[in-house]
Image: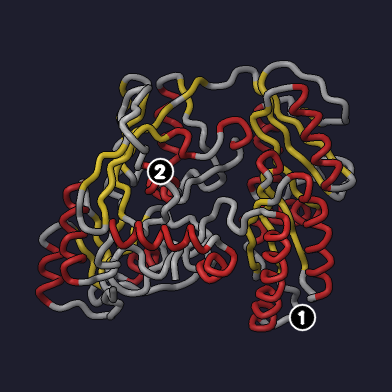
Amino acid sequence: MCVRNSRMLKEDQKKQIRSVCRTILSEDADYGEYSAFLTDRTNLRGRADAICFPQSTQEVADLVRIASRERIAMVPSGGRTGYAGGAVPDGGIVVSLARMSKIDYGSGLLHVGAGAITANIHRRAEQEGMMFPVDFASSGSSFIGGNIATNAGGIHVIRYGMIRNWIVSLRVVTGAGQILDLGANVQKDNTGPDLKHIFIGSEGIFGIITEAVLRLTRKPHDTTLGMTGAASLEEVLGRLQEAKATTDLLAFECFDRRSALEVMAHLDLPEPMAISPWYAILEWEGEAEFPFDLAVAISSEQKKQFWKYREGISESLSRHRIYKNDVSIPGGAMPSYVEKIRNLAESLGLDLAVFGHAGDENLHINLICRSSMSADEFNDRAAQFTVQSYELIRSYKGSISAEHGIGLLKREDFARYGDPARIELLRSIKKLLDPSGIMNPGKVLI
């Protein structure tokens, strides 16, 4: 089914859209305001005919019905912090959820609009003496709707799991404009399959998440943060197992020497400890002793500084031309995989920075363009690297997208390396929920 990717909307279409909610049209938009909705962290630049700002689920449904009838593409837009191009439009309507930002508390749950900023949800939970445990470097600007649509993880997955574990119920608008309430706000509900999971991680290709009810948990007490150096990734993973045997970890993050050097230079931080090829940051609750050397943060300020070495990596690397891979590798195979891709990067004349969530087997592979290399040459070599890297991942039975999703950038890779039966099932679900094919076209599925 074809949808409009034309730059121009008809006058009657503009009138219909503007009758629903505040709308900015491309021809009369202030460029500074308008351009922010055409990209994400990939820095890919898209285009759109209109940007709409609904304030309720009903307004979203009204917009979707118009778009479905007129065959106009729609792209849900949150904080646009993704790294897969999932929020980059190619014509049609961008639907910003920014005005749907309510956060209400009741009975130990948070009822939130899809446009609620993740950090504001954290603060609201803390006001009630509770915690929403899904946290990551972009929490200050990401929207909860986007977090849910990409099944976000973050630094505490080792303890709390992915965001789907904390979703009690969802309100969504399908690609046909139907409003669905999925899940029940009770502990036990065994009335058939839990359909909210179809939309968690769906990247907006089935419909638009507009509201959610979130589960909270207690705040951990007496947390301690430490950093350790290691001679190899294998040694890092050995310390992870030793730490897991000793305590219930809240986080276990790792990064290589190149990542540390980038952060130190960009944020003007001192050497974290004795120079090492690898580093790991551990966070745990209560008292614990570990059978390896560990620098322990002795103040809240030092804790913040320790976290900067890990959470400042992406920002620090953004000073360069980089190409990202976000992958999952079974723990025992991670050292072998990293050794092979280091050799591969070197053979292609590329620099490499590796960091990630060692506790949940997720690594972020960052190729860095050398100053002597043109952008086109870098992109070509990075593409060669990625093909060989993904072949390795397939041999290890890992994942080519651990947490950033498929979006625009990985859809061809997903078609090549994904399970054909699963992909065909996704196509069938999309046809059922989005019969006009308007929802985030060109993303995830080719």
Instruction: Give residue 236's position: percent from left, percent from top.
Output: 81, 41
Q: In which quarter of the image is the C terminus?
A: bottom left
Residue under the image location 61 percent in, 59 percent down: 400
Residue 41 in sight in this render: no
Residue 106 in sight in this render: yes
Seen in the picture, residue 98 relative to 246 is either above or below; the reply is below
Residue under the image location 49 percent in, 43 percent down: 139
Q: Nearer the viewer, mark 1 or mark 2?
A: 2
Residue under the image location 48 percent in, 55 percent down: 81
Mark number, residue 372: 1
* Closer-to-camera residue (115/67): 67
Disc 1 to disc 2, C-alpha distance: 47 Å
Instruction: Give residue 153's position: percent from left, percent from top.
Output: 54, 43
Instruction: Give residue 323's position: percent from left, percent from top.
Output: 64, 67
Q: Name the residue under label 2.
A: 197
For label 2, the crowd category at 10 Å Cα-Cα, with few meaning under 14, some 14 to 19 and many 20 or more, is: some
Task: Indicate which disc, 1 or 2, sits on the residue closer to the N terminus.
Answer: 2
